[in-house]
Image (tube, rainbow, N blue to C red):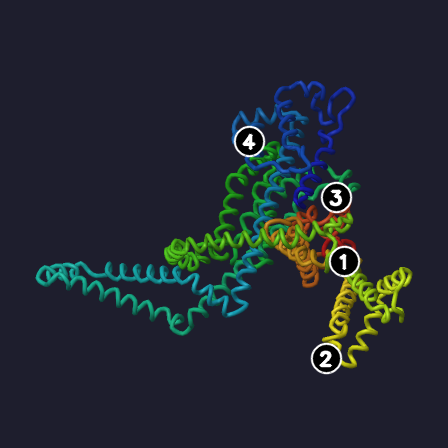
Amino acid sequence: MSLVADQVRRLDAYLDRLPVLSEETSEDGVSEVGHPFAVTEALDVPHLDHLLRIVRSLSTTSSAQPLLSLERVKLLLDESGIPAIADRVEGTAGGAYAQSKTPYENEIEWLLVSKATVQVYGAILNTLVDRIIPLSDDMWYWDGVLSSYSYSSVYTIQTSPLRLWAWSHEIYQASRSRLRSLSAAEASAELVESTRSTISQPWSRFYGVVRDSIREHSFANIQRKVLSPVALSRAEARRKLAHLRKLREMTASGLGVLMDEGLQLGHDEERAEAQDHEDLKGVVERSVALMDMVLKEASRLEVNIHDFEEKVFAGVEEDAELSVHVEEMTPYRPSTLARRLVQIIDKTLPQHINAMQTLANENGRPPAIIRYWLPALIGITSSTTILKILVNRKADIIEWITGFGSTLRDFWLNWVVEPTEKVIKTIRHDETSEIAIMSRDSLKADRESLERMVVDFATDKPHFAVGGSSITEAQIADIRSKVAEGDVTPVLRAYEQDLRSPFVGAVRGDLVRSLLIQVQKTKVDLEVAMTGIDSLLKSQELVFGFVGLTPGVFVSIGVFQYLRGIFGGRSGRRHSKASGKAIRILRNIDRILSEARPTENNVLSYKDHGLLLCEVHVLRSLANKLMPDNIQKEFLEDLDDLANVKGVHIQSKALERIRWAYARWLR
């Protein structure tokens, strides 16, 4: 929501609350000034009905777009016929029209002209605001150029074609003037001599003239010999920066003058109700003159701010079209104002815009073609080489792209999809997903084999197992149970006995058999240990599944966030950019209030108030990007307190309140 739009909406609403007649009408429809007139009869007059329709068309009907286009305002003024009346004021036709006008018709014309003035006033304010904001961007550019010699050197290279062209043009003009300065006698003598001499001599003389012009031009510009090109560029940047700063201050001063002194209607409701209609008409009349003077003087950089303000107010006081200076034109005041509004729309405002645009173009940043001609030239000259490289390595490039796609596909399947499936199977207790170091029936088969070996050994050698010559089934069952617990005592007894005579035991005894049974026992013990490890892994199978999934997930999230930062997530970036811009605007407002030189009434000067209004205007446009709708209303109220001229201390408190109250959305 724009600050200018709120101002226009407030003024339009105030005009809608005004009574149409300036004189009180008696009960019989006759006004106190003696004009027999009935309001009900006036409504039936086609001309008045036409004027009322135009008044409704000039009213603010939309909260989003309260301002009408200037073309629309001019069209409505022309349809009303009021501006044309000023051209017919002289003669009997003008006198007859003045005698036939009723008070009601006069008041409707005033209301129509006042509403048109409000629309033109809003358009001028928007024009000034729109011109000030881009100037700040250009000033930041020149500050960057002057911030370091590297940027100054880049600017020198960027503008070198323009400098070369300007120097060549100056040499050409100087040579042309020198050739024209030759007398007729010298020219005829040269012609006669040229007919006798060779063809190359006139050209040599022409080159001599050019050489002399270059020498004289160089002597006339000794500064170019003293200063380096970078120093000249920095001097040019300082000059343009000073002009932009002066233009910005002048425009801001004009904006402050219009906001503080133009159309001061309805600020104090009690005073406004008691205000006479003639005073209101005088305010409208003076505001039109004020707008005219501001537009004419705001683009002149040769005067300072104080002289500009004095010249504007002096021009308003001495304006020849004010009714205080031309009493005989009083009946035609609405038509005079309407004609002046049309003149502002057709001539004054376009001239101001053209002058501002010319100054901005002359002192603003160079065009894009100047700033980027060198990279574009390098790109164009190297495009053939790049194209040749691409054509020669077409197969390699296709292979790289294919390999990159295959790598991405394999990464996604092997490190994201497959681990995710394993984790899901683990959660669902899928037996096919269980971690296993060894097969399921390996330990059982080896243990049964060990039992059979020990039992067979005990049956063949009972004296090692039970100390007798025979063994019973109960003893065999007992040996089998002990083997299941890891006890192979019969085998160890035989191993110990044969170990006393290893060679004899190996040939005639049971050393080899007992040793092989112990190897089987070692294998079973190893499988038991592996089974324990296997059980431990199975208990932590879900943890290992997530550990295997984590790298792929982290890499995928990182790539997704990177791509989102490039191609998506614009809302977050817009909010971050808007909040950063809002913080810089608050910094600028604080600087304006800190460095301001208040007037005797402790209010900001016109220039400081205009700069403040521009910053507030931009901050209001960022409100819908920073905070929700229910907070925007309070935020806009605080911004109104900051923009209104109530005293520097009140504005400073409003700025401090904005900082702590809305810090959550401005971070």
The numbered disc on residue 503 is: 2
Q: Which residue was labeled with disc 1?
A: 445
Which residue corresponds to the image point at 40% horizontal and 59% vertical from the top-left?
378
Q: Position of residue 500 (x, y in %)?
A: 79, 81
Mark 4–mark 1 distance (CA, rounded to whole Å): 106 Å
- Between discs 1 and 3, the one toward the N terminus: 1
Quadrant location of residue 529?
bottom right
Q: Is residue 524 above or below residue 300?
A: below
Q: Which residue was labeled with disc 3?
A: 629
- Between discs 4 and 2, the one toward the N terminus: 4
Q: Please state if 122 lies on the left or on the right of 386 as rendered.
A: right
- Between discs 2 and 1, the one toward the N terminus: 1
Which residue corresponds to the image point at 87% horizontal and 68% vertical from the top-left?
469
**For the residues bearing labels 4 and 2, Cβ distance under 8 angstroms:** no
Count of numbered marks: 4
The numbered disc on residue 75 is: 4
Q: Position of residue 180 (x, y in %)?
A: 24, 58
Amino acid under disc 3 = Asp
For the N terminus, the image quarter is top right
